[in-house]
Every structure is written in structure tokens, then in C-alpha cells.
Image: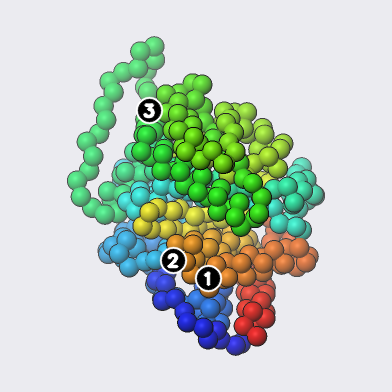
Amino acid sequence: MKSYCREKMGTYSVTLLPGDGTGREVMEEVKRVLSVFQESGLIRFEITEIPCGGQHYLENGEEWPEGSFEHCRDQSDAIVVGAVGWPGATLPNGDVAGGQVLLGLRSALDLYANVRPVKLYKGVKHKVHGTFRDVWDHELVDMVLVRENTEGLYHALLRRSAMAAKGGDKDDPLVIDRFPGLNGQVEWDVRPISRNGSERVVRFAFELAKHRESRMGAPQRVTCVDKSNVTRGCRLFREVFRGVASDNPEIETNEAFIDAFSMWLVRNPEELDVVVLPNMFGDIATDLASVLQGGMGMAASANIGDKHMLFEPVHGSSPKHAGQAKVNPIAALSSVQLMFETLGSKNDDEDAKLGSAILERAISEHLSSGAPVTYDLGGAASTIQVGNAIAERCMVLLAEQSS
């Protein structure tokens, strides 16, 4: 393969956290694709792999080796996670072992924007009533959901995980003695939403809309989704959204309540471009949206802050499928594509941007050509077969680009 000879950006330090179950399997395909781009000379990486997660906890009594958080914080340009969580792997306080890996990094590195692209590729069929069929039009499903990633219902868990990851004093527990009108045992969680946290993720969504408009050559709309007709935190979120919208009058906007939006999402996806949501609603809506693109095996994500970035497929460790080499690696490979794109934008690196375009094209061509796919898309191919096929397509495209 020919190498690229023009002046290159520096080497990117990438930390891989395979985690548990099928996360380890898809990470092998991530490494396969990264090696293709490394060998081409287009993008250079220095890769560090750190064992972590619930299985590591059961085997070693730790969620990850000492110093792992500091490495991610101080020596990583980007982090890629496989999946975290394993049956029976629970901390003494009841939290999932491995939480300080994923949740701790989200909170401690202040990765406030969870970015979930929802794009339906040509050739992908949807499983409905046990059979695979064409349901949505691939030309009409191309949106990005932006979920606030550090506050809301998960704030307390995120804080605990962050404190465990980086050390330091624990927060004093919140105490509420009773809830008027409720009797017997009551468990509760708070859902704080702040002005600062809301404003930064909403501004991120508007900047993303501008980026998509420039790249796609089509106007983009930003839709705010909340429950501001009921909850005070969401009223603040909606108020902040309107303020940021007034600063960006060139961007069309829309507003929706989460219950009605859930219907619109599957009925009229062509009306959605960029969607911004508080944490819990974003968690639920993004998984629902994955159905539009073929399921969780196709769902990639980026966790973005001002100084750090982390990428992960969102399908989880899937213990029942672990060790069978059957899960779809495309969500993980699309997460790498997001990493290339984000590194390219952040560093004004045209080679990383080109790498993003090549990897996305390889995935698209694999799916549209009728090539073998995994069980979740109606096929019988293995994780390795799909990963290898996409890696080989990348090699061909890279060779064409460098010739």
C-alpha cells in the first residue's frame, strides 16, 4: 500500500478500554481498522490498551489498574470504550463494577455532550414481528441527538463514579426524611438541571447544526425536547434553549415534549436534524432512535467535552452473546469514524477528516452492496468477518486515495 507523503499532523494518543463481554470482541475489530489507517500513513496513533470493567473486577478486585484514570485524563487525545458491565460484578455500595471507567470518565472529564448520530444506511433492513423488511427510507433518516451527559437523574451516580475514579473527598449525602402523602418504604433520586450545564450543551447542538449545514449543504433545524410543561428543571432547559436560539436566528428551531416526540421520532424522522435533550430523556430517546438505523448494533456515540473526548458503541456487553463472535461491530467502527471526525475538526486535521470519510464510505458500501452482515441485521456473518470486510474496503479506498 502506498503511504502518504505530505506533511502530517502529530501522532494521536488513543486509549482503548475493551471492558466486558462483547466489548472485548468489537474492540478487536476497532484495532484491526486502526491498524489499516496506521499502516497507510494517513493517520498516526500511539495506542494504549487498559483492562477494565466488571470481569476485571471479579478477577482482580479492581475496576481498572491504578493510574488508569490519570492516563486517560493526562495522556490521551481520545478514548475508545468497548462495553462495561458483567453479571455478578457489583461494588459493595450496589453500583455496577466498572462504573468508574465509563460513568467516572464522563463526569470527571466533564464530557457534557453525548452525541448520537442516527443514520440509516442503504441496504439495512429492520426486524419487525420477527422478520426483516424495509420500513424506513434510508434517504429520510439522518439526524443527530445531543444528550446532556453530566446532570439530571444520573447526576448522583455520575458524581460517585467520578470521585471513585479520581479520588478525593466524597460528597455529603442528601437527606430527605419523608415525602408527604407517601407511606411505607420510599426510595428517591434527584434530577438537578443547571443553567450552565444546559447552556453549554444547547450551544453545542447549535454549533453542530451549523457544521452539518456546511457539510451537507442543506439547512438544519434544532429541536429541543423536554417536559417543560411539568418539571421545573425542564422549564429551565427550555428557557435556556430559547435564549441560545435568539443568539442564532439563522438556525430554524422547534420544540417538543418528550412524550409526543417519541411518536414523531418513529413516524416522521425526516423532520429531524439536530435534537437536544436533558440527560434521562436523551438516554431513552437515543435507544429508541437506534431502531430507525437497524438497532443497537448500528448505534455509535461520542462523549465530548471542552478538553477530552470518548467514543463507544452503545449496545452494552451483551453477556448472553459473549464469546460467540456474533455481535455487530459496526457500532464500534462507526464510533471510530466519529473519533476521526472529531479529531479532524478539533485539530484542523484534513487527514483525520479524510479518514472519517473513508471509514464511513467503507461501512456504507459494505451495507449497500449486500455483503454479509451479522444476525441483528438478518445475516449469519461473524463479528470478525464483518470487521475484516470493512477493514479491507478501507485498504482499497486508502490505496485509491494515495495513488
Residue named by callout 2: 347
Quadrant containing the N terminus is bottom right
Mark 2 is on which residue type? Answer: Asn
Disc 2 packing (10 Å; few <14; some 14–19; many ≥20): few
In the image, what residue occupies the spot 57% across and 41% down? 251
Query: Of residues 314 and 219, which is closer to you in this image?
Result: 219
Mark 1 is on which residue type? Answer: Glu
Q: Answer with mark 3 or mark 1, whichever residue precedes in sequence.
A: 3
Q: CA distance from mark 2 to mark 3?
A: 43 Å
Q: CA distance from mark 1 to mark 2?
A: 9 Å
Q: Answer with mark 2 or mark 3, whichever residue precedes in sequence.
A: 3
Quadrant containing the C terminus is bottom right
What label does residue 188 carry, if any? 3
In the image, what residue occupies the spot 38% across and 58% down? 308
**Does any portion of residue 216 appear in the rendered image?**
yes
Establish if 284 lies above or below 380.
above
Establish if 80 lies above or below 264.
below
Measured as percent of width and height from the top left, residue 63 is found at: 34, 58
The quarter holding residue 52 reads bottom left
